[in-house]
Amino acid sequence: MTFDPKSQQAWRDLAHTAAVVLGSALAQHDIAKGQARSMTVARRFDFELMAASTSIELQFSRGELIARGGGMRAVMELVDGKLHIKLQLVGYAMLKIGAGTEAHLVSKNGMIDHTFQFSLSGSATCIFADTPEVRQGLNEYSVEIFD
């Protein structure tokens, strides 16, 4: 695969890759200094796609998911073979808590453990490989916003 400098998607992919590499380096640095997870969780948002289903296959919902208890919505899309989870904080109180802050998306099955940052407008996009384990993890996951 070659890099096309005229392609907007190529630039977005490059920016995402750089953000992931930088985030990973910073996380490793924090762990080495014993500072990892020194922040406290300000708010937790739980998402559950298939509460009554026994299937492990992720079913993309039409429209958006609202976190249990409200405050955040998520939209899942399959884009170029990758799973995109678009998150948006909802309401002034949630924007005040989470806009511009670090957050953590973790699946109940332990297959997803991803740290990211919300924009100042309260949005974020998490991109994952389309694997059976990740799809299973996206059936039930939480987003935690740190203080």
Image (tube, rainbow, N blue to C red):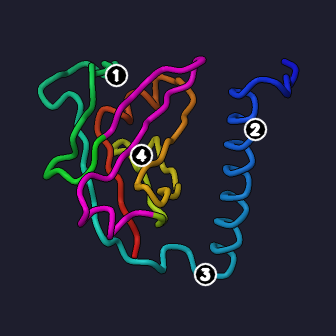
Q: What residue range appears in magenta?
A: 74-99
In the picture of the structure, the residue carrying the numbered disc 2 is 14
Disc 3 versus disc 1: nearer the observer: 1
In this picture, is 37 found above or below 58? below
Task: Indicate which disc, 2 or 4, sits on the residue closer to the N terminus.
Answer: 2
Residue 22 at x, y percent in the picture: 72, 58
Quadrant holding the C terminus = bottom left
Task: Indicate which disc, 3 or 4, sits on the residue closer to the N terminus.
Answer: 3
Tell me the tag on residue 110. Answer: 4
Give the Cα separation between the discs numbered 4 and 1. 16 Å
Quadrant holding the N terminus = top right
In the picture of the structure, the residue carrying the numbered disc 3 is 34
Disc 4 versus disc 1: nearer the observer: 1
Q: With 29 as the anchor, is 43 left or right in this view?
A: left
In the picture of the structure, the residue carrying the numbered disc 1 is 58
Name the image quarter holding residue 129. top right
- 95 in the magenta segment: yes
Q: Amino acid at mark 3?
A: Gly
Please state which of residues 119 and 104 is positioned toward the viewer in this rendering: 119
Residue 85 at x, y percent in the picture: 43, 36
Q: With 80 as the anchor, is 9 left or right in this view?
A: right
Name the image quarter holding residue 64. top left
Give the Cα separation between the discs numbered 3 and 2. 30 Å
